Amino acid sequence: MPVPEFMSDQAAGLRRLHPVSPVRVIAVASGKGGVGKSNVSVNLALSLVRMGRKVMLLDADFGLGNLDVLLGLQPEYNISHMLEGRCTLQDTIIEGPLGLQIIPAASGRKRMADLPANELMGLVHGFSQLKQDLDVLVVDSAAGIAGNVTILSQAAQEVLVVVCNEPASITDAYALIKVLSQDCGVHRVQVLANDVRNGIEGREVFEHLNRVAERFLDVTLNYLGFVPHDEALRSAVKRQLAVVHCSPGSPASQAFADIARKVDEWDIPRVPRGGLEFFVDRMVGMPNLAAVG
Ligand SMILES: Nc1ncnc2c1ncn2[C@@H]1O[C@H](COP(=O)(O)OP(=O)(O)OP(=O)(O)O)[C@@H](O)[C@H]1O
Ligand SMILES: [Mg+2]
């Protein structure tokens, strides 16, 4: 199925606008809900900003977004307004702490929770028009294995799976990685153990997941590290602040800083062009989306 004409026009326009370094797109996912994806997304994004990177955070929990609540922000528009034609994707961008750019999602919009492919395509179209000069786009996904999650993970260069030391979290992380590797062509996944007591427990969680994945799946799991259980994080959530912003010396904040340093050392994405084109091109190229183009 050919790429829709407007997409190739946009891609050509972007090639002129962004001749330089590629944007690294990191999708944060988990399988089970409530394991800390949104906190990881926000605090990783802010730690990268602290290192001087230009970062955008996309709330891809389209039906139950809460990054704005997490950070005490009051956006005028969100992605659902953009898809209704009430604003552009550019209009939805709000500034968070330290200048972090955030694209908020709707909250309590059931229809948005599993966007039909043509609407996800509208979002892709919006991305192709963004003018921001970015180093990293962090995508905070919804829990589970719905189409939105797998499509965005498939389009990102790196998928970061957050897992806690609970049987259901490990089982659901495995289920997500299975779908990504068997159905979506994802063959490398970064694993972050969250809310664990210490590095030993974090490593054990990873080894547990890795043993099963190595045995049954064609995928490489990389251990990205751990974030300890930290009351400072819980208290930051209650105050609608990011822990790395309000308690930079706390154990969780230091762990996020270490993880951001590792992320920053990953190889530069091997893509021929800059901007968000790579992300956009990959989504456009997906059979399940291209079919509606
Ligand atoms: N490292 C941690 N230390 C202490 N508490 C934590 C930690 N990580 C997460 N939490 C707690 O877990 C809660 C849920 O975190 P978060 O909203 O980031 O999860 P989520 O995976 O994004 O959830 P959902 O699947 O609903 O989107 C936080 O509000 C916080 O209270
Ligand atoms: Mg969340």
Image (cartoon, rainbow, N blue to C red):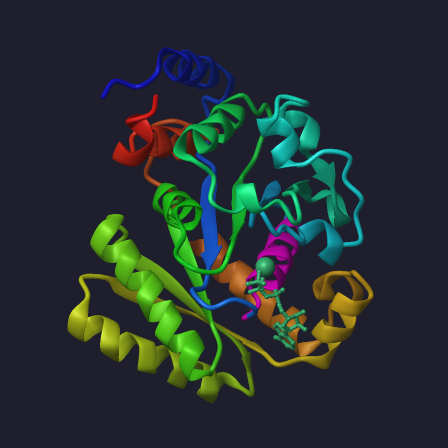
In the rendered image, residue 138, in percent from the top left (x then y), is placed at 53, 48
Quarter occupied by the N terminus = top left
Side of 68 relative to 82 (left or right)? right
In the rendered image, residue 171, in percent from the top left (x then y), is placed at 36, 75
In the rendered image, residue 192, in percent from the top left (x then y), is placed at 46, 69
Towards the viewer: 139 or 118: 118
The dominant secondary structure in magenta is: helix
Quarter occupied by the C terminus = top left
| Magenta part of the chain | 35-49
Report the number of numbered marks. Answer: 0
Decide if residue 247 is in sight here: no
The quadrant in which residue 216 appears is bottom left
Towards the viewer: 277 or 212: 212
The quadrant in which residue 12 appears is top left
Towards the viewer: 18 or 168: 168
Side of 125 relative to 282 (left or right)? right
132 in the magenta segment: no
